[in-house]
Each structure stands twice: as C-alpha cells, then as structure tokens.
Amino acid sequence: MNGALKKSDRKHIWMFLSPAIAILFIMRIFPIIYTLGISFTDWNLVEAGSAGRIVGIQNYISFFKDPSFAQAFFTTFRMGFYSIVFSMLLGVSIAFLMYQDLRGSRFVRGMVISAMIIAPVVVGTSWRLMFNPGNGLINVFLDFIGIGGQSFLAQQETALGAVVLASVWQDSPYVMIIVLAGLQGVPLELFEAAKIDGAGYWQSMRRIVIPLIKKSLVLALIMRTMDALKVFDLVYAMTKGGPGKATLNLNILMYQTGFEHYKLGKSSAISIVILIFISVVCGIMLSISQKKGGVSDGL
Amino acid sequence: MGCNIKKYSIKGVLYVLLILVFLIYAIPIAWIVLTSFNHDVNSMAIPPRLFQDFTIDNYIKAFGGRGLRLNFRNSLLISSVSSVLALVIGTPAAYALSRFRFKLNTPIYMGFMLARVAPAMIIAIPIFVWSRALAVFDTVGLMIFVNSSMNLAWVVWMMRVFFDDVPLQVDEAALIDGCNKLSCLIRIIIPLSMPGLCSTMIFCVITTWNEYFFTLVLTSVRAQNLPAALTTFTSVYGMNWGQMCAAATVIMAPVLIFVMFMQKYLIKGFTMGSVK
C-alpha cells in the first residue's frame, strides 16, 4: 500500500493500534519513568511520609560504598558469563549432533526442547532434588564413583556452580534450536561440492558451515545474554540467593530490597542499574555484530 | 573395508552421544515424576528406592487438603484469559504495523521491541504500588491484566512477522470485493495466518503458565498460581518433597504434552526471524 494514506486508512490504523499502545504506555512506559522517579527518593513503605522524600542520586552513590551491591553485581556477571559460555557450547554441540539425522534424534530433540519450556521454578526444584545431600542423584553418582557427595547448594563455594549447571541445562536447548535452524538452512549441495573439491569434514565445517550459521550464533548469543542477566526465577527457586550471598545476583537483591525490606527507592535504583547494565552489554554485542554483518532481524 | 569400520565407529560414537543427551535431559524430569509417585520414606532413602510401591497419596494430599486446587484454577484462568486478551489486542496492532506505512510505524514497532526485552524488575515497583493504591493487589483480575500486557509485545512482534508473509494482493483482492479493513482482517487475513496465531497462542499460554516473578510480587494468597505455590512448600511445611514434586509434575504435564504434539509450532515460534 504505497503512496499517501487515505483518510479511512488513518482511522483504521489508530483503531487497530490504540488499545495496544495504551497498554504499552500504562504498563511499560509510565512504570519505567515512575521507577526512575522513585529511584531518586528514599521511599520506604514501613516509614510513613517517606514517599516524596527526594535524596537525589544518593541511592546510586551508596552503591559505590556498599560492598553487598558490588558483590551482587559481580555475582550477576559471573553467573551470566558461565551460563552463557557453557550453554552456547552445549547448545551448539547438541545442534551439530541433531544435524547428523540419526535415528531417534527427533524424539531426543523433543525431550531437549521440553527442558526449555518447563517453568524455571520447576527446573530449580528438580535440580535441588538432584543436588540433595545423600540421596540426590548427583551425590549418589559421586558416591558410586568414590569421590563422595557434598551438599552443593549449602556451600558458598559450590552453590554458584550448581545454579549455573541448572541454568545451562535449561537454556542450552534455545541455542540448539536457533543453531539447528541455521544449519538446516545450509544447502547440502555445498557439502557435496566441497567433498568433490577434496575438503575434509573439519575443513568444510570451518570454511562453509560456520560462516553460514554465524548469524544464528550471534542471535543465540545476544538472546542468551539478555536472558542470563535477567535470571531470577531459577536462582530464587534453588537458593533464594544463598547460602550467605553466594548466588545473590542483582535481580534477587532488587527483589529483597524492595519487597522484603520495602526500601522502594533503593530497589528502584537497583532495577535502573540492571536495565543500564543489560542495555550496555547487549548494545556492545549488537554493534560488534553489526560491524561484521547485520543480525538485527529477529531481535 | 577399513573405511567402513571407521564410518561405523563414528556412527556408534554419535549414537552414544545421542543417548547421553537424552539421559541428561530425561533424568531430571523423570526424577521429579518418580518422586511424586513415591512416599517420601522411599524417595528420600539413601540410596533412593523409586520403583518399589507407587502411590498417588502426594497428589491427594497436595491438591485435596492443601488447597492447591485454588492455585490450579488460578493458573488455568490467568493463562487462558490473558493469552486471549493479548491476542485480541495485539493482532490488530500487528496487522496495522505490517500493512500501513506511516510516520510512526517504526518508532511504535521499536517501542514494542524494547518492551519485549526490558527486564520485569524495572516495572515491578510501580505496578506493586499502584495495585495497592487501586485495591487490586492479590486479585486474579490484576494477574490477568499484568500477564496479558507482558505477552502483548510478543504477540505484536510474532503476528507482524506472520502477517508480513501474507501477500499484499490478498488484501487488495478482498478490498476490491467490498470488504473494509476490519472485515478483511477478520475474514481473510486471520484465517490465512491461523498457524501463526496458534504458535503465538501457545507461547503466551506457556509463558503465563510458568510465570513466577510478578506472582511473587503482586499476590499473597488468593491469586497465587501453581509455580508460586510450589515454592511455598519449603518455607511453610519443611521439605515435603513428595507433594512438591506432585505439584511440579502438574505444572510440567501440560507443557510436555504441548511439546509432544506441537513441536513444529514451537520450533517455528522460537526460530522466527533468525532464519529469514
């Protein structure tokens, strides 16, 4: 429908769009502005009259002095980093395995995909059961091979690793699906041609397949990054941020500050920091990938 | 000959890996289901005895006495109504963005995209404050509204991609035949994008069915869904693994059935935009 819009078209556009835009404003844009506003106050729900008390950027400054904030920031980063790296590795590996078209691979693929769409809370519960000291499967297995089990979720040193393992289990399937779709778009003739030209398996992988699926890889990486930095459900269901503060990431810190201690001002400031953090990380990734060929589709 | 042996041994390794992947993904799920059908005495024994005597006691206790029926009803109500609502509001918007070129098209589309990727934490506090001010805190209606607004950006994005696949000539033919824009959308375009609509619907239902963060923030008892109820087992009743796993199984079951029958739609939804 090129050219100038007719008057009746204009009427239809707004009839179609206005309910959705209204909700976008009520549930997204106003709340974000409001959150930003609250973050400049020290509003505390249990303290009457603190609602409008403006403290400027005090909340943000206090983060620099607050070691628990720095720790949560670092935990978010570490948890995200490991989860992204290992889920990319596992997801890509499974995608290549599925691409081999083995008998039964469709069935296995269905099983793998299930993990991705089960509620994170259920996945957390399941892995808590697996890590349970004594009778959890992982400990039974470790006992069996003679290493001896531990209560992984109750120890500061191992809790983060255990949570990352659960998140890799749940999030690799997404990478697998995206990469597999990319692989299935690679024309088979290219393989045949490469074989005739005398290229080995690894050579044709590196020279033909990887460049062709680069777009899928980058898309999976960016989506995974966004998700990994936003993770709340899984961690909260597994450890509630504990033991101590071992798995307390920014999202859980924000929840605890706002909804357990009712410090709405400070909690809002944390959520603004989360938003900026995610935007910066993903912005950097996007601009790097755009320089090397765009992938803005699908985001 | 030697070449054949190499080929078969590679195949063999691949099959072993395939089975390994299957086990990695099947065991944690199977473990929950098995625990839900066992008495805690057996499933918590060291080593666990999971195949001795099955029981549905956990289900009876969890859904009978403990009132998980209320959470189940909430989950069902919230995920179905909010998904339909998101589709009803989002589909026309997606159609407008797909079909009309106007100045604000791109900014509005970008607005929905940003809404899709923004973390839930950023809007939690205002919605919490407002829901208490409006006295709708902990109501099913609030959760329906919040969830459908969360799904709206998804719907706009997905449906726009599906509408873009329907050729413009279809609209033009319908318009010549005397349809107006609205009846053209309802009678011609939506039936043509039915698979897309199903994909989108499944996504909304599953996302809402699994929703946890907003339920934690915006409900206390009455409007809690199943995932929120699941985490209360630990705090109030100690570790009641059997009943907890029964609840977890009930949360998983519909989703697993979806995967079994609708794998194609799901994959289509997830890969949309990535292969185009």
Image: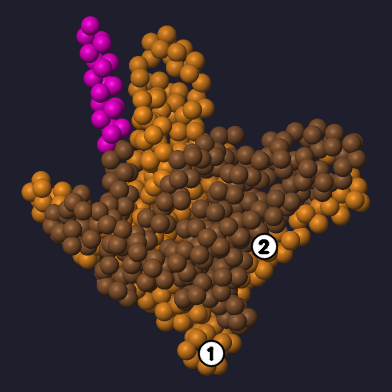
Chain colours: A orange, B brown
Q: Residue A285, percent across and down?
A: 49, 48
Q: Which residue is at a point 43% across and 47% down the rendered structure image?
A: B256
What is the chain identity of the residue bearing mark 1? A
Q: Which secondary structure lies at badge 1?
A: loop
Residue B55 found in image quarter: bottom left
> Which disc is residue A50 wearing?
1
Which class describes the residues within 10 Å of circle 2: few (<14), some (14-19), or many (20+)?
A: many
**Quarter of the figure that contains the N terminus of chain A:** top right
Question: Which residues fall within the magenta stretch?
Answer: B1-20
Q: Which residue is at a point 40% across and 57% down the rendered structure image?
A: B250
Identify the residue under disc 2: A24
Q: Residue B83, percent across and down?
A: 60, 56
What is the chain identity of the residue bearing mark 2? A
Q: Which residue is at a point 39% across and 25% down the rendered structure image?
A: A101
Q: Is residue B17 magenta?
A: yes
Q: State whether residue B131 is above or below residue A276.
A: below
Q: Which residue is at a point 81% across and 57% down the rendered structure image?
A: A15
- Say left or right for A128 vs A275: left
Q: State whether residue A233 is above or below residue B65.
A: above
